[in-house]
Image (cartoon, rainbow, N blue to C red):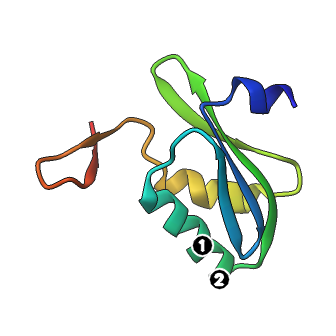
Amino acid sequence: MLKAISAQFVIKVDGIRVEVSKGQVPEYFIREIKLVQRSAQAIKGKIYGMRRGRQINLECSKEIPEHILQRLRNVWRPNPTPSNDGSLKRR
């Protein structure tokens, strides 16, 4: 519960449903979660965006396996900035 209070964003994942329950998350990341679910398995749990200094790091509830979280960390851009064409790129 404490994680959910201090998190920048919270994403609830329940089978094939992905819902952002707090904060804002880039659309590319929601798409990636759905891709992971289709290719790996239907996962359930919560994903938290925790601020660590100037970056936002990913953490998850214990229901989500570590290898799934690592796959999501691999595509997460901790400091995305909008480019001229509206897409997000890394600083």
- Seen in the image, is 85 located left or right of residue 10? left
Count the numbered circles shown: 2
Label 1: how many Cα within 10 Å (few below 14, some 14–19, many 20+): some
Identify the image quadrant of residue 33.
Answer: bottom right
Question: Considering the image in quadrants, where does the C terminus appear?
Answer: top left
From the top left corner, tell me how far across and down residue 73 is, in percent.
57, 51
Q: Which residue is disc 2 drawn over?
A: 38
- Seen in the image, is 82 located left or right of residue 79? left
Label disc, if present, on residue 34 of the rendered structure: 1
Q: Secondary structure at mark 2?
A: helix
Q: Are marks 2 and 1 in contact (CB under 8 Å)?
A: yes
From the top left corner, tell me how far across and down residue 41 is, in percent.
76, 79
Q: Which residue corresponds to the image point at 77% horizontal and 55% vertical from the top-left?
A: 66
Task: Tell me the distance, in whole angstroms, between the alpha carbons under discs 2 and 1.
Answer: 6 Å
- Look at label 1 and name its amino acid: Lys
Q: Which residue corresponds to the image point at 54% horizontal and 62% vertical from the top-left?
A: 30
Closest to the observer, 74 or 6: 6
Label 2: how many Cα within 10 Å (few below 14, some 14–19, many 20+): few
